[in-house]
Amino acid sequence: MSDHVVIIGNGISGITAARHIRKKSNMKITVISKESDHFYSRTALMYIFMGHMRYKDTKPYEDWFWEKNRIDLINDFVTEIDTDTKTLKLQDKGNLTYDKLIIAVGSRPNKFGWPGQDLDGVQGLYSLQDLELMEEKTKGISSAVIVGGGLIGVEMAEMLLSRDIKVTMLVREKNFWNPVLPVQESEMIAKHIESHHVDLRLQTELSEIIADENGKVKSLKTSKDEEIPCQFVGLTVGVTPNIKFVESSKVHWQIGVMVNEYLESSIPDVYAIGDCAEFKKHPTGRRHLEQVWYTGKMMGETVAETITGNKTIYNPGIWFNSAKFFDIEYQTYGSIKNKLEENETEFYWEHEDEQKCIHIVFDKETRSFLGINAFGIRIRHNVMDRWLASKMKIDEVMSSLRDANFDPEFYKLHEQEIVDQFNQENNTNIQLKKKSWKRIFSRS
Amino acid sequence: MKALQNIGLSLFIIGLVIFISLIFVGKYNLTNETFEQFVKDKGIKSELFINDMKTKVVDKEFSNPFSFSSEIISSLEAANETHKSNSEWGKVIWGKASSFTFEIAKSSGYGIVRDNKWLFWFLTFGLGILGSLLYIIPTVVTGGTAATKNNGVWLNPATNRGWIGWFAFAFLVGFYMLLYFNPDYIVNWVYIVDPISISLSGNAASQWFLYGLLYCTVMTVMAARMYIKYRHNKYQILRTTSVWFFQIVFAFLIPEILVRFEKPWYDFKNAFPLDYDFFFKWNLDELIASGGFGLFVLVWGIFLTLVIVPVMVYFFGKRWYCSWVCGCGGLAETLGDPYRQLSDKSVKVWKYERYIVHGVWVFAIAMTALTLFTYFSGVQQMLWIDMLGTHLIKTQVVQDAYGFAIGSIFAGVIGTGFYPLFGNRVWCRFGCPLAAYLGIVQRFKSRFRITTNGGQCISCGNCSTYCEMGIDVRAYAQKGENIVRSSCVGCGVCADVCPRGVLKLENGDEEGRISTGPLTISKTEIKLNSNVL
Ligand SMILES: Cc1cc2nc3c(=O)[nH]c(=O)nc-3n(C[C@H](O)[C@H](O)[C@H](O)COP(=O)(O)OP(=O)(O)OC[C@H]3O[C@@H](n4cnc5c(N)ncnc54)[C@H](O)[C@@H]3O)c2cc1C
Ligand code: SF4
Ligand code: SF4
């Protein structure tokens, strides 16, 4: 096969697809992307701003890698897709034909039409260009407002605070990140964020951003009619697929590019992966858009299988994710929603320092383990994956907790405390087992 | 708080400036009496040298160490040259000229520093310690909450190879050059530590005592910084305590106390081949001459290298030595910690690293083999025949070459001097023959690994950036693969800086240690493995 695969977007999903196609075939591979010459880790944007790393440290592969693996890179913007002639129109470098096309163009920050949302000093954070802009617009300022309490909002707050800029954060919901987090965690994290001197305003929305005489942000008006003086506004109210240029093509789209379980779009030989893919029906019944790093990676791997001849259904397995809220790491495995379902019951343990907690959800009837949130405690992925896949009973989960801990050596462990509390609340008499390497690494 | 830090910084700079300027202070006058004594002690037979010294140096006043030492060296060289050309071998003065002049200078200097040793100790060491602590301790508050904080590391000229880094580099290199090659210029520095040396070993200080004391001081102050920076991480706290303890007690106090009891100076934790002159004739002779104790040291040294080191590496990885015990590691993990991000992560440098470090190891082993051959056979040289012809290899020459190139230049000048440019483990990564040996054991027969937590890696790059050994940790982590690398010293910082809890240093079953990325997709329906291209 010497088909020409063209990938639009050099983010995690596009690059994973390219690497895996190369591993399995001899196809000609071209990656077109506008944001940067080389693949870099978007998740590390905050660390560049805070001076932990340079841009070059965020590139997972050295620059020689692409040529060596015969992955051609074009820095340009695709303005149009003509699926009849299988041609892409590029902004600067003319036309390019493909045999197979993978759309992996990611997202862009949401803007909901607020008055003043395009003023000087108002922006989202998604790309390197956004980062540069933020660098420029936050020079010498003293206060900022962040609208939206998602993960990127928290990252932005941390970034601004690292430059001694006062941060106010507006969150629509009654609890922090409540669309995702159960209320217990929500409250703990809200306290933590406030302990970092963020002025967190719950149940508050943006109503208007006000400019000074030079068109620069001067203040922000909230839904509670308060006016907060600020020189910078970060809009972090989620992202949306970055597919404007697809809209004029024959490829079917709604919010994102519509795909089936094979990641195929409505047009043959056109696929979509990563943040910009929208499932008609998700193969495992999850949300139709999956805008995280890991799923982008999995979609890239899956589409590479299909394109190289092994038609493969996208099956990401058991959900997992992680994030960090200032000093508190967060890991989640399985399904744990902000509210319990009918059949579910829960167990919640929180450390007295309010920096660690474990939240477990299990089935009332069958006692099967359904999901876990861990804050401030690291958990072993492979162990969780196995426990969840095998629908392990909660009693066994509790007694095997030591196998799950992934904290660094010599850290204080809390399993005994956790199990004691569980026993007390549930009238059980579960005994903690000793950690077992055999169980940790067993594959079944 | 910030004000306190600024005061600290100023005090530190004042101490540093005084320290440097001490080189230019004081006068030198070699009295006839001292010189006669010196000639007697050293058994110098060259009347040429003695007479030349008497006309040019003795009872004359020199206002700086440079002209003083250059006069002595020119007398020495002229005399040696004449004796050699006349084949008067008995009259030639052997040994390192700079050590020779150091001893003369040490007994000839006079002036304000020598008269006020404690005062100047305080104005240099004292201000340095006080200033640094005043700078470091307030970071408990100014440095933010107890958690990994690397804010501004790449924006600060001290830690991003900026002008402060270059200045630190120049200072460190200069210091090591003086220490190894011109100790006669720094007798004033040595004077100020005399009182401490005398209280420990009963002898006046040598340049090596100065170095040892400075080393311990710097490690102690910077250990305080480690305690604060990593106060959330018990692994780091324990590890820092351990290296600090081994440096102070094993590398510094015990050897000095041994000397006090007229035993040979010996650092019990310094394993061959890092301790490259362990098998040198002078050392073996000295050990054997000191009876039961010497014999014990001899057996211990061999046992340490052949048994303790590999067995411990099997159970815990090379970290037990490199990050918990070793003095070089100790400095790297305290003074060097702010520079860890400067190590190069490229595949190219990794390749050089393997050639160089294993090359040094081969060199050390070959030199030792030659040394032992000479020791037991009495033959001073060997014929070596290879494609390039026949070479005469003199044991002494090989030892000198190793001592100069590896012992002084690599371990000292480059190894530490280059911290501010190439990171804090330059020596450990490229030069240490013991690290090469430990690494081979770690790579092929050990329970130690860094486990990667399934598919949680977001490829951010923090781990690779802060790996002092220049390991591209992310390259493994993002594939879901465990990190099993000979060079990993188990400092644990990659696991600390990872924002997603992906890495864990652990000792476990050998089975499954080297895993091949299982978990990007967890279900069995598609068996995708994520090896790189
Ligand atoms: C600040 C930040 C932090 C994040 N942190 C996390 C995290 O911790 N964990 C997590 O799971 N997820 C995180 N995410 C989300 C995650 O980064 C995304 O899900 C992921 O990067 C999406 O990858 P992708 O390959 O789909 O698209 P992208 O990475 O967006 O790549 C698409 C590329 O295509 C380019 N492009 C778009 N249109 C065109 C065109 N027409 N022509 C040419 N090029 C085009 C874009 O410029 C972009 O470079 C974070 C996102 C941000 C912004
Ligand atoms: S891999 Fe991690 S533990 Fe090993 S040397 Fe590098 S940073 Fe330290
Ligand atoms: S620091 Fe953690 S998340 Fe970042 S690249 Fe390394 S292992 Fe992956």
Image: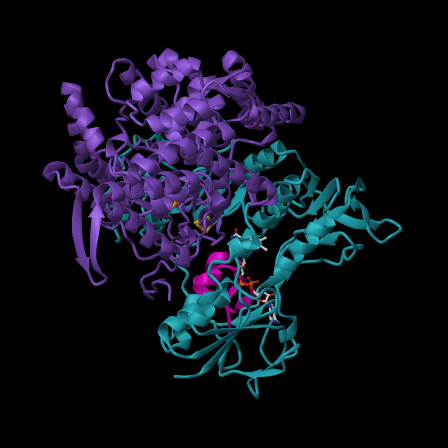
Chain colours: A cyan, B purple
Lateral position of residue A395 relative to residue B394, left or right: right
**Residue A400 place in picture, x, y as percent:** 30, 39
Q: Quadrant of residue A306?
A: bottom left
Which one is nearer the viewer's eye here, B420 or B49?
Answer: B49
Which one is nearer the viewer's eye here, A65 or A208?
Answer: A65
Judge whether B341 appears above or below B375 on screen.
Answer: below
Judge whether B353 appears above or below B280 on screen.
Answer: below
Range of magenta residues: A271-299
Lateral position of residue A408 relative to residue A433, left or right: right
Lateral position of residue A417 relative to residue A439, left or right: right
- Answer whether residue A330 is visible to the viewer in this image: yes
**Residue A129 place in picture, x, y as percent:** 66, 59
Which one is nearer the viewer's eye here, B120 or B384?
Answer: B384
Q: Quadrant of the N terminus of chain B?
A: top right
**Residue A284 place in picture, x, y as percent:** 43, 62
Which residue is the extreme one toward the right? A213
Residue shown at 32%/49% (left/top)?
Answer: B357
Judge whether B189 appears above or below B322 on screen.
Answer: above
**Residue A13 place in picture, x, y as percent:** 49, 65
Q: Quadrant of residue B270?
A: top left
Which one is nearer the viewer's eye here, B7 or A63?
Answer: B7
